[in-house]
Image (cartoon, helix red, strand yellow):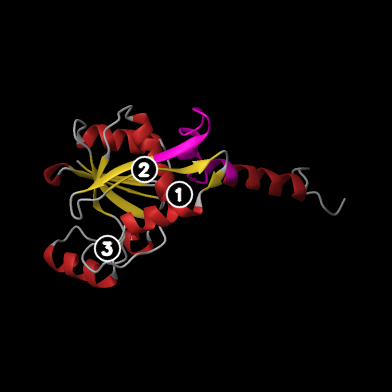
Amino acid sequence: MKNKLASGISRRSLLGAFAATAISITPTYSNAAGFLRGGGDIRRLKMYSGRTGESINTIYWIEGNYIPEALTEVNHFFRDWRSDLTHQIDTRAIDIVAATQNLLNTNQPYTLVSGFRSQQTNAMLRSNSSGVARNSLHLQGKAADLRMQGRSVNQMARAAASCSAGGVGSYTGSNFVHMDCGTVRSWGS
């Protein structure tokens, strides 16, 4: 048989095994979405911005569908408050934030420290701190820096990390947690 390898395994079987392995190890945000199932299949985001004084308490997803008007509200809330520029916030990042809030089992809103950042804001922050990435996921609307009254940085970071859905940075000295929908990784103390 021309499609058999030396060991007797067909090429198709070998490719299938590689595909199954790749699918099982590929990090996704589906774990975060899994933490949001139940409760009528709605997803809610409850946050406060100390920078603008604004609050948001919105249901942004119902029965498998994102609500465009709610996402527009989230985009505005996550805007770069220094420049007032908005950007489309990645729904995967929103899902991670909502899943983590759900896991913390609290009615307290998150306090948004930083959402979307313009290039100018990111450059300014980089000039003042070595902890700001040149190609930060904040620039793409894929990250949020958050704190929560009544929950420690470690509690929030553990909840976010349990989603296995993106990056989690602990900034204990500044009292916030970075959450993003990039590759699964963690840093900080």
Label 1 or label 3, whichever comes before in sequence order: 3
The location of residue 29, given as percent across then percent down, is 47, 44
Q: Which residues are magenta?
A: 23-44
Say whether marks 3 and 2 touch (CB < 8 Å). no
Task: Check disc 2 and report its element: helix, strand or loop.
Answer: helix
The location of residue 179, given as percent across then percent down, is 32, 47
Within 10 Å of the Cα at label 1, are there few (<14), some (14-19), or many (20+) other Cα atoms?
many
The residue drawn where x is 28% and y is 63% is 117
Label 2 or label 1, whichever comes before in sequence order: 1
- Amino acid at dot 2: Val
State yes or no: residue 43 in magenta: yes
Cα distance, mark 1 to mark 3? 19 Å
Within 10 Å of the Cα at label 2, are there few (<14), some (14-19), or many (20+) other Cα atoms?
many
Q: Which residue is mark 2?
A: 97
Q: Do we see residue 178 in this rendering? A: yes
**Residue 92 badge:** 1
Of residues 186 and 111, the one drawn nearer to the viewer in this rendering: 111
Label 3 or label 2, whichever comes before in sequence order: 3
Task: Check disc 1 and report its element: helix, strand or loop.
Answer: helix
Q: Which residue is mark 3?
A: 80
Of circles 3 and 2, the one toward us is: 3
**In this picture, residue 119 sits left or right of residue 32:** left
Given the current orientation, which residue lies at the most extreme bottom position? 120
Q: Is residue 159 above or below residue 59?
A: above
Cα distance, mark 3 to mark 2? 18 Å
Q: Do we see residue 5 in this rendering? A: no
